[in-house]
Image (spheres, helix red, strand yellow):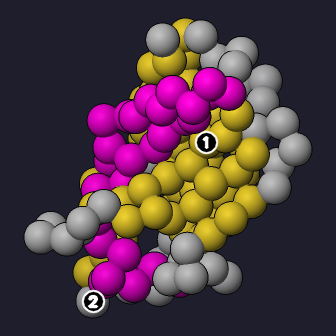
Amino acid sequence: QVQLVESGGGVVQAGGSLRLSCVASGRTFSTALMGWFRQAPGKEREFVARIIWSGGSTYYANSVKGRFTISRHIAKNTVYLQMDSLKPEDTAIYSCYARESNSDTHWGQGTQVTVSS
């Protein structure tokens, strides 16, 4: 099993920045990719970004492209989400996920990000 723990959420004014972290533990040797989803109140869960664990290639939702940057530290089993130029519509619970090579997917508990106008 893989356990994921997020941190770094909080309250920030519009235009500000936050960096989320997600640490993976347990059976991490078969991790294929890691990424982030978010869910705002009353809305469906939305893909944000992902990174291929070995090669490092990234992919972003159009809504965050150019403002958010996903990265990883392989030795620390950690994925980061640097969020800049935050907007009130970025307010959501951000959840980290890890997908193994066999397609099993694991989720963190989520961290709240609130952007005030």
Q: Is residue 117 magenta?
A: no
**Rendering coords of residue 43 (x, y %):** 19, 71
Q: What residue type is labelled 1?
A: Met
Q: Give the range drawn in magenta.
A: 84-111
How far, Cα to Cα, is label 2 from label 1?
A: 30 Å
> Does residue 38 appear to the left or right of 84 in the view shown?
left
**Rendering coords of residue 9 (x, y %):** 37, 53
Q: Is residue 35 above or below residue 101?
A: below
Q: Which circle's residue, 2 or 1, is located before the other in the chain?
A: 1
Residue of label 1: 34
Q: In this view, does 10 lie above or below 15?
A: above
**Rendering coords of residue 14 (x, y %):** 38, 85
Name the image quarter holding residue 69.
Answer: bottom right
The label shown at residue 63 is none
* Residue positioned 48% across, 40% down in the render: 97
Q: In this view, does 64 lie above or below 41?
A: below
The label shown at residue 117 is 2
Q: Which amino acid does label 2 sit on?
A: Ser
